[in-house]
């Protein structure tokens, strides 16, 4: 009979398309998704069928890099209790061809500027919360590239 041991604390991603390697944070977390072998369309996370051509048998998993640029942004002034506002929320076009909604750090939300459109950003991750089982929850965020 197996002896019961203390439950090991896990590290879980806040979204399913963020993958946390076993030896995180020594090995960086990354976005992943599926690419269609028929039409080359790319998606974040798991899919059963291609959203562009409908193919179901030619989807394969791909790893995405964390570099991209701001497509559009918004300064958010009101949020839920416990989260700091204002902050900069953006849709980011990753260099690998998918887009993601995330917060961007390194920009002053009090001074939004049109020069932010197209600004180069880089993904980073951090533990932002603990779930009810005490596991760390890791979120992906972006910061302005130097
Ligand atoms: Zn397709």
Image (cartoon, rainbow, N blue to C red):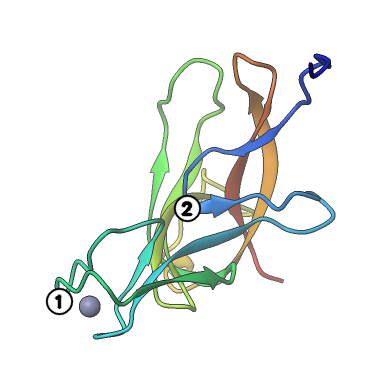
Rendered residue at 45%/74% (across/down): 118
Q: Is mark 1 within 8 Å of ligand 1?
A: yes
- Mark 1, Cα crowd under 10 Å, few <14 / some 14-19 / many 20+, is few
Frontmost residue, 76 versus 12: 12
Which residue position is annotated with label 2?
Answer: 17
Q: Residue 90 versus residue 86: which sits nearer the camera?
A: 90
Label 2 sits on a secondary structure element that is loop
Position of 112 with respect to 133 (left or right) is left
Camera sees residue 29: yes
- Judged from the image, the quadrant occupied by ligand 1 is bottom left
x%, y% of residue 13? 58, 41
From the top left corner, tell me how far across and down residue 57 is, in percent.
27, 73
Q: Is residue 81 left or right of residue 25?
A: left
Instruction: Name the one closer to the observer, 126 or 4.
Output: 4
3D distance between C-alphas at marks 2 and 1: 21 Å
Indicate whether 52 appears above or below 124: below
Q: Is residue 136 above or below residue 72?
A: above
Quadrant of the image containing the C terminus: bottom right
Judge whether 47 appears above or below 120 on screen.
above
User: Residue 53 shows which numbered tag?
Assistant: 1
- Mark 2 or mark 1: name the one nearer the start of the chain: 2
- Return the x and y of residue 108 as percentages of the image width and height: 58, 49
Residue 40 falls in which quadrant of the image?
bottom left
Left or right placement of residue 139 versus residue 126 in this view:
left
Comparing 123 with 31, the one in front is 31
Q: Which residue appears at 65% of the width and 32% of the height?
A: 128
**Label 2 vs label 1, nearer the camera:** 1
């Amino acid at each position: 009979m197996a002896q019961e041991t203390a439950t090991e604390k896990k590290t879980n991603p806040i979204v399913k398309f963020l993958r946390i390697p076993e030896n995180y944070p020594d090995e960086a977390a990354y976005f992943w998704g599926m690419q269609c072998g028929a039409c080359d369309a790319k998606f974040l996370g798991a899919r059963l069928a291609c959203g562009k051509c409908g193919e179901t048998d030619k989807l394969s998993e791909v790893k995405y890099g964390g570099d991209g640029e701001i497509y559009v942004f918004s300064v958010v002034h009101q949020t839920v209790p416990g989260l700091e506002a204002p902050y900069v929320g953006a849709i980011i076009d990753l260099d690998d061809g998918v887009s993601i909604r995330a917060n961007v750090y390194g920009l002053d939300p009090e001074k939004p500027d049109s020069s932010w459109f197209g600004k180069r950003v880089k993904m980073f991750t951090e533990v932002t919360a603990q779930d009810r089982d005490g596991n760390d929850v890791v979120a992906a965020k972006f910061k302005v590239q130097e």
